[in-house]
Image (cartoon, coloured by chain):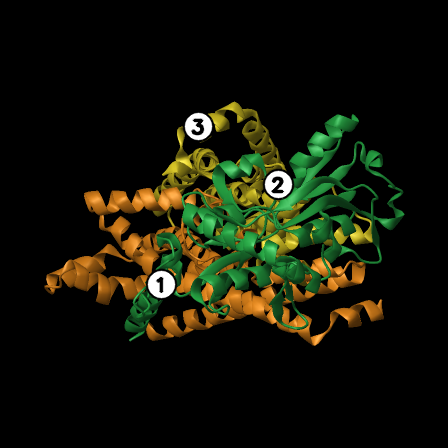
Amino acid sequence: MDRFAAFKWQALFTDWRIFVDGLGRTASTAGLALLLSLGLGVLFGMLATSPYRSGRSVSRLYVSLIQNTPLVTQIFFLYYALPHLDVVLPTPVVGILGLGFYHGAYMAEVFRAGIQAIHRGQLEAGLSQGFTYAQTMRYVILPQAAEIVLPPMTNQAVALIKNSSILAMISGGDLMFQADSWSASTGYYGPAYLTVWLIYFSLCFPLARLAKHWEEKSARSRSGEVKAA
Amino acid sequence: MIEELLALAQWHNLRFLWQGLAVTLQISVLTIIFSFLLGTVLGVMRYSGHWLLSRLAAVYVEGFRSSPLILLVLLFRFTTPLKPVNSGTLAMSLFTAAIVAEVVRGGLNAVDKGQWEAARSQGFSWIQILRYVVLPQALRKMIPPLIGQFITVVKDTSYVWVTGVEELTGKGVIILGQYGTASQFFAIFGLIGLIYYLLCWGLQRFGLHQERRMSWLTM
Amino acid sequence: MKRVLGLMLSAAFLLSVLAGCGGASKSSDSGSSGTLPAQVQKIKDRGVLKVGVKVDVPKFGYKDAAKNTHEGVEIDLAKRIAKEIIGDESKIELVGVNAKTRGPALDNGEIDLVIATFTITEERKKSWNFSDPYFVDNVGFLVKKDSGIKSWKDLNGKKIGVAQSASTKKALTEQATKDGIKVEFMEFATYPEIKAALDAGRIDSFSVDQSILWGYKDDTNEFLPEKFAPQEYGVASKKDNTELAKFVNDLLAEMKKSGELDKMFEKWGLK
């Protein structure tokens, strides 16, 4: 148990700033990546359910490509390969783009399912009223889809926060990297990893709880829903 | 550019990558099997509503689910005397089991409660109902999310590289260290990406096939 | 049927995991005419010496993909120690380690010794036992030929890629303070990644022990003239494994005296 010796904890607390820096980088990267993934999710979710063949194909291609290759491969590609085309993205940007596009594919599937869950009649009603496809989406379908979509979307957000730890593999300065770097130079990996686990837990667990709460609420309200003939 | 690619496309490099693929497959298969078994047990524990079992399972599930996989892989590497391949497999198995547990729980919840009453009236015990009536039906609903998670397992084996395990991604990075031009970089990444893509796509087809098979049976 | 298969497979998995756990020690049937201290005897009884070595440092510990071999002077040294303890130099298990994993691998009992370009430092001596040095090297730098960087001082304000947990970062920080320049470090887990980062222009220089750098020299990069901070490599063992440490050290001293150590290094064109 000397992995968790008292003096090691002391060293950790003396260097707390390093971990706070890491947490800040994690928060900012995850936050921006989340926004990007939401945007991509809505865009490709709509494309996937559009009446246009090309739109559906593009969406399917994007989702299939991203979901069937590891995040590590995608990030390594952005980080190590792109510079050979003279595209040198700063490390945080690699994280944001990589995470955003990766989870964007999963968000796209979430939105696609959500949109498709709304009864087709809604779309027809909207179109019959003179709305364009895009307007129907914006004012009729998406607001309803939002309730269905909220729980799985939150779960994706949790996954994104966890995956932000991939920055540790490209010297990205996030929480995981700092824990790794600090414990590599001091050798005190016990306290470092445990503390970081606690921090990730306190970020992810409340969000997961929230998702579950919304899921139950949505299930309750939908069970009372009268299904249109 | 052609000479560069030819320099890369040597037999020993391909064999090198093949060794990595073998490790990736080994970790994936073991993780899938182990996490499925453990996850099912945990999911049933949660579903049971038993005051102790349910709580224990909940603690396990939430604890492992809220942790980044990289962290678990590193933690297990440094605190267990296992070979890196095994500590990585263990970390991935325990992590994936937590996620499988939730899928199983969801699947069980989706089975109509009436099934329980009907079976109970026939004199089946709780375990018997679970094994012969409820689980089989739940299984069909569980296949898509499970397959999705197992595909993620195959992809996440790339995280094990941080502990020095030479799986496919690791082998790729090592080769990268020996070659430095643009075309070679893209070739290596392209090949590795393609291999992962084929693996995952294959798993997806398998899952679809299984799902179709099961729905035909329960028709 | 599927269920039974699944149970059998999981049992197999559990068994293989436990088997990896330090393993059931097979005691040799020979009555131990033990002049060996207890800790060393344990290794002899187990029948295999587990040593952590590098896989990516040519001449020291290198897995050659083309020849499908794992060879180097440190591996020769490991085999020599195995011969001394167990009597057979093939009774050895070589575990690939890098700067980050070699220390923890000793701590958790995965390996008995580390012979992996492990630099002896005062701080590290607190955590592990080190033998007397068997080789001395310096920290060197690789830069891209067209970078315009010609010396250490040119690295002021630039990014240097180092391996996590290697002694390089500390050595360079000290030297930088002495010379009044400021450098930024980027840390990676393995050397190939640092090389890839150099190729990609993510770092301006790849810095680590010179002998390790030789493995990554190619037509696109060149060495800087400076070499600092003599790095003494030692054989490391777990802190409480003092008997093994002494045994190894005595063997090393013997090999130095008899000239065997020098011959070993000359074979690889070192020293």
Question: What residue is rendered at 62% in x and 43% in y?
Answer: C166
On the image, the x and y values in percent for residue C116 come to 59, 53
The picture places residue B149, in percent across and down from the top left corner, at: 46, 57
Secondary structure found at label 2: helix
Can you tell which quarter of the image residue A92 is in? top right
Give the label on residue A7, or none. Answer: 3
Residue at 76% x, 63% y: name it: B184
Chain under numbered label 1: C
Judged left or right of residue A65, residue A155 is left
Give the letter of the yellow chain. Answer: A
Q: Using the image, name the chain to which the residue with label 3 belongs.
A: A
Task: Tell me the crowding category of disc 2: few under 14, some 14 to 19, or many 20 or more residues within 10 angstroms, Cα based.
Answer: many
Q: Nearer the viewer, residue C268 or C144?
A: C268
Q: Which mark is residue C45?
A: 1
How far apart are the alpha carbons under marks 2 and 1? 55 Å
Q: Secondary structure at mark 3?
A: helix
Chain letter of the green region: C
Query: To which residue does mark 2 refer?
Result: A33
Identity of the amino acid at label 1? Asp
Rendered view: C204 above or below C9: above
From the rendered image, report the letter of the chain displayed in orange: B
Residue C267 visible at all: yes
Disc 3 versus disc 1: distance between alpha carbons?
37 Å
Q: Of marks 3 and 2, which one's residue comes earlier in the chain? A: 3
Subunit under mark 2:
A
- Image depth: mark 2 or mark 1 in front: 1
